[in-house]
Amino acid sequence: MTVSKTVEKAGDAKGRKEAPEVQGEALQLGELSEQLGYVLKRAQLKVFENFLRCMASLQLTPAQFSVLLLVDKNPGRNQTEIASTLGILRPNFVAMLDNLESRDLCTRIRSTNDRRSHILVLTDKGKAVLTRAKKLVATKHESRLNDLLGQANREALIVMLSKIANEF
């Protein structure tokens, strides 16, 4: 551990001191390490980092992958339903759809029931990218989580997190 000397700031008329600087040692987290929200967020960041590495060749984010999955599994549903299910704010979702459409992965079709609404449909390219993405997720991403946690712990974690997501 290296601690610098306490020195006066140059030009500080009141003679204030700089705080000692500690380098090379991890911060002590204290109670923060026991806060569920903090630990969940740190885990989410690590999971997302791994996901992005696995999806680098397809250039898909976790949110984009989720949209493609939901559109594929729910044909004829509108963009408001998809965004709401994923908890994505409307302006962010519109920008994401613009990106997915520009890459020819999905398209918006005006609803015949409600002209203000758009139905989302995967393109042929979108279906092919989703098929490749699901294989990458299964073989590289989810398998790594399974290896780390074990199947039983993974399933238990999904149950616990789902309870928080659905009942909290």
Image (spheres, helix red, strand yellow):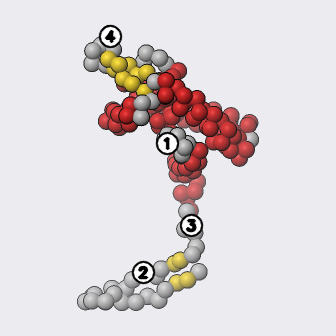
Q: Pointer 4: what residue?
A: 112
Q: Residues within 10 Å of mark 1 (few under 14, many from 20)?
A: few
Among numbered discs 1 and 4, the one appearing first in the sequence: 1
Among numbered discs 2 and 4, the one appearing first in the sequence: 2
What amino acid is found at the position of numbered circle 4 in the picture? Thr
Among numbered discs 3 and 4, the one appearing first in the sequence: 3
Residue at image point 59% right, 44% down: 54
Q: Quadrant of the N terminus?
A: bottom right
Q: Position of residue 11 (x, y in %)?
A: 27, 89
Q: Residues within 10 Å of mark 4 (few under 14, many from 20)?
A: few
Q: Do the residues labelled 1 and 4 touch (CB within 8 Å)?
A: no
Among numbered discs 2 and 3, the one appearing first in the sequence: 2
Q: Position of residue 130 (x, y in %)?
A: 54, 30
What amino acid is found at the position of numbered circle 1 in the picture? Gln
Closest to the observer, 109 or 167: 109
Q: Do the residues labelled 1 and 3 touch (CB within 8 Å)?
A: no
Q: Residues within 10 Å of mark 2 (few under 14, many from 20)?
A: few
Q: Position of residue 66 (x, y in %)?
A: 50, 32
Question: SS at mark 3?
Answer: loop
Disc 2/disc 3 C-alpha distance (Å):
17 Å
Q: Pointer 3: what residue?
A: 28
Q: Pointer 2: what residue?
A: 19
What amino acid is found at the position of numbered circle 2 in the picture? Ala
Q: Quadrant of residue 8?
A: bottom left
Judged by depth in the image, the label closer to the viewer, 2 or 4, is 4
Judged by depth in the image, the label closer to the viewer, 1 or 3, is 1
